[in-house]
Image: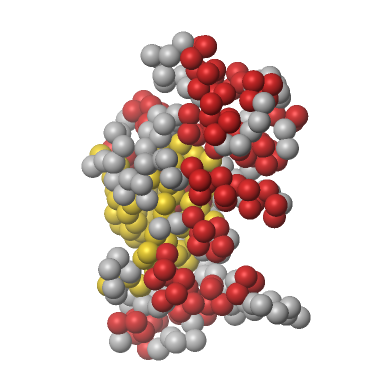
Amino acid sequence: MSGALAVRDLSVRYETAQGAVHALRHVDIEASPGEVVGIVGESGCGKSTLVTALANLLPANARADGAILYDGVDLAGLDARRQRMLRGDEIALIGQDPMTAFNPVLTIGDQLVDFQHHRRDLGRAEKRARIVAMLGRVGISDAERRMKSYPHELSGGMRQRVAIAAALLTDPGLLIADEPTTALDVTMEAQIIHLLRELRRDYNGIVIVVSHHLGVIAELCDRVYVMYAGEVVEGGDVDAIFHGARHPYTRALLACDPAGFPDRLERLPTIPGSLPSLTVPPTGCVYAPRCERAFAPCGLAEPRPVPLSGSHMARCHAVSA
């Protein structure tokens, strides 16, 4: 069922004792097979809620509206059994923390065999042969011996490589990498980025990379969506976002990237102000209270997406003025 992904007008709220938290509001994204799409934004912008919704793993207190179309099928309309079949078959998730990704009392080999439970056409020996080949593909030497290891016997970088191998063993049409380098040091981060860049040459499915690290997004992605306070405020191909950003928030985010400063600074730049409350989102543009370009319409009406060049768009009154 590998095909295109289209998220249309997706809104997600969490019902809590303190009231509804509007984690996502009217989100639209799309991706095609063979494309790597980045989701970027500061903590609390809704990135993890979006990928949780894509994987049909929202908690019980979540309420979702809108559509998530994968190969033309609305995932939200599927029954629980069909959703479970999709996860690990068509949709795979690489999580943030490789330290807790595996069962500590089972060997890596046994767990990777179990991850192929849907491949009933393969015997156990064939599944183990696929594991050896995949571990070698993600850069783990002496794969036969490593299959006998327990998770605690592997470094963080090796566990993240095994997590990537586990996801690829399921032959997913949609691979979601949620902050895949967050728990790693700089050296391991560079190795995982290099690995993902190598793998994309052979993988023809959709890859969604979620990160607050702009360098990771720039290295890996074809298309980028910038999120702020539960909304997509700008989207377009990677060159348009990194070299021709139009939304004030995107520009401010790029201006704070330490990689953009050739010299040492006494104090890193920040974006003044703070994120708005998601329990009572502000009227009009969510970024207006922090925006240097805000003017009268920004506090009155929610901005609509403004088409720019190609697939580039921005939600901003100043852009359309």
Way the structure is coloured: secondary structure
Q: Is residue 114 above or below residue 65?
A: above
Residue 75: x and y, percent? 32, 39
In the picture, the quarter occupied by the N terminus is top left
Horizontal and vertical percent for residue 80? 37, 29
The image quadrant where one finds the C terminus is bottom left
| Residue 294 point in image, percent of width and height | 43, 86
Residue at image coords 55%, 58%: 216
Left or right, 278 with respect to 149, comes to left
Q: Tell me which residue sits at (29%, 74%) in the image.
A: 308
Residue 263 as seen in the image, left or right of residue 134: right
Please tell me which residue is depicted at 33% across the width and 75% down the height of the picture.
303
Lateral position of residue 229 relative to residue 99, left or right: left
Residue 162 locus on image (x, y percent): 60, 33
Residue situated in front as seen by the camera: 257 or 229: 257
- Residue 263: which quarter of the image? bottom right
How many marks do you count on the picture?
0
- Would residue 22 be seen by someone viewing this image from the given angle? no
Residue drawn at 62 percent across, 70 percent down: 259
Q: Quadrant of residue 186?
A: bottom right
Asked whether residue 110 is in view, the answer is yes
Horizontal side of 128 relative to 68 (left or right) equals: right
